[in-house]
Amino acid sequence: MNYYDDNFGHYNIESEEDVEFYHSMQRQSVSKRCKGCGRMVRIKRDYAYCNSCADARENGFDF
Ligand SMILES: [Zn+2]
């Protein structure tokens, strides 16, 4: 199964244990506006950027 999460992006989950992890991650996440792209995303409370912005930042882009 293919899942999407704004913390980590797309990922493939095979085992039930990992689906559990996915759901607990979703529960810990809140809707907020990404500081990078300004989209409403569902990310962890202590995250400021969605997955694609976090990737961009890792590649040296600055907002
Ligand atoms: Zn973003």
Image (cartoon, rainbow, N blue to C red):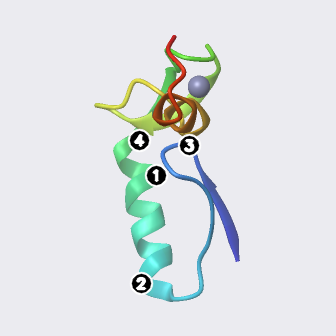
Is residue 34 rendered to the left or right of residue 38?
left
Residue that numbered label 4 is attached to: 29
Would you say the residues marked 3 and 4 are in contact, meaning their CB atoms lie under 8 Å apart? yes
Identify which residue is drawn at 34% across, 46% down. 28
Q: Nearer the viewer, mark 3 or mark 4?
A: 3
Residue beneath label 1, please?
A: 26
Mark 2: amino acid: Glu
- Secondary structure under tag 3 reads loop
Comparing marks 3 and 1, which lies closer to the viewer?
Answer: 3
Q: Which mark is residue 10?
A: none
Residue kind at label 3, given as amino acid type: Asp
Residue drawn at x 50%, y 75% is 19
Bin the neighbour count of mark 2 within 10 Å (Cα to Cα): few under 14, some 14-19, many 20 and up. few
Res. 30 image quadrant: top left
Mark 2 highlights which residue? 17
Q: CA distance from mark 1 to mark 4?
A: 5 Å
- Identity of the residue drawn at 56% across and 43% down: 6
Q: Are marks 1 and 4 in contact (CB under 8 Å)?
A: yes
The disc label shown at residue 6, or none: 3
Q: Earlier in the sequence, mark 3 or mark 1?
A: 3
Q: Mark 3 and mark 1: span between their CA atoms? A: 9 Å
In the visual, does 1 lie left or right of 27? right
Q: Earlier in the sequence, mark 4 or mark 2?
A: 2
